[in-house]
Amino acid sequence: MNAFFQFQFYFFSLYAIASALLFVTRRSPVPAALWLVNTMFALSGLYVMLDAPFVGVIQVLVYAGAIMVVFVFVVMLLNLGRADTTDVRKIGARTGAGLIGLALLANLLVVLRARIREVPLADTGDNVVTPVASALFADYLVAFELTSIVLLVAIVGAVVLSKKRVRA
Amino acid sequence: MIAEALFVSAVLFSIGVVGVLTRRNAIILFMCAELMLNAVNLSFVAFAKMHGVTGHVFVIMVMTIAAAEAAVGLAIIISVFRHFGTVDLAALRSLRG
């Protein structure tokens, strides 16, 4: 692993963490959503560097391109773009939340101290979709088909929840 | 490099948890949940470098479930806004004794 690669990896990591911090501290929903999109772009860079270019592309297309657009669309629909009053909780709740976050982070880091061995994967060359597809459509076919039912239920549920009640 | 990616994943997840605990805007809460799902996705991809391509399949599943969750959750937020006129979770106190 050369130095430039390592530099880029740390750059994308810092970019993701800084964007996430800015996202959590923004008061208005629209800048928050844009910083979250920034985090997702940085994460897609990390995916590409972790030998998962297909997942990186899907991240940009689906997460940044579709899911976040729905969020911004709802912000526009409900006219929540202006944040006149803050929605951050009081100082007591903030300290408690910070302590809980630090405790969780410490827990996760202690778990991560276990030695991690890096196994070089078989080089797939330029063909990045075939391994994912063969796992998705052969080993996990039932789970893949079940997600279609989940999506159908979600669509029906969203329509039922958001339509106006019609008095019969 | 896997250890660094897992470290970033842990930091992002903690930021998401702190966001959920400190904010009251329902939409921002949902976005914090998305951030946590992204953190988990990053650790899936990092572990996929160790254990093979199964992790990528799980990431695609997580993204599908996240899309479904966003659709239903935002529909719920819209009906909450119709009912209460706000998405501030402090206004939802019907169940408070």
Image: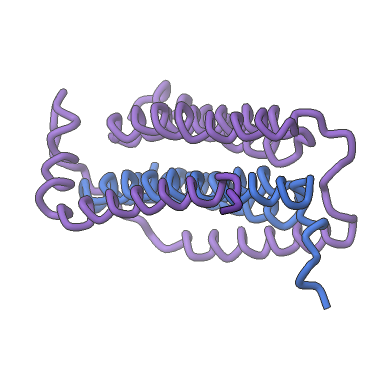
Chain colours: A purple, B blue
Nearer to me, A139 or A69? A69
Which residue occupies 36% across, 25% down?
A2
Q: Quadrant of residue B85?
A: top right
Q: Point out residue A92 in the picture as x, y percentages from the top left corner.
A: 88, 62
Give percent across and percent down for residue B61. 32, 49
**Number of numbered markers:** 0
The residue most toward the front is A168
| Residue at 37% across, 35% down | A47
Residue A137 position within the rendered picture, expressed as x and y whole percent measured from the top left: 13, 46
Answer whether residue A48 is visible to the viewer in this image: no
Give the vertical position of A86 relative to A91 (above or below): above
Position of residue A13 relative to residue B9, above or below, is: above
The reply to whether residue A110 is in sight is yes
Left or right: residue B21 versus residue A15 is right
Q: Is residue A111 above or below residue A135?
A: below
Q: In this view of the protein, which residue sits in the foreground, B29 or B13? A: B29
Picture quarter with the N terminus of chain A: top left
The x, y position of residue B90, in whole percent, is: 82, 57
* Residue at 21% in and 46% down: B53
Q: Is residue A47 left or right of residue A7?
A: left
Rendering quarter of residue B78? top right
The residue located at (34%, 46%) in the rendering is B59
Q: Is residue B82 left or right of residue A92?
A: left
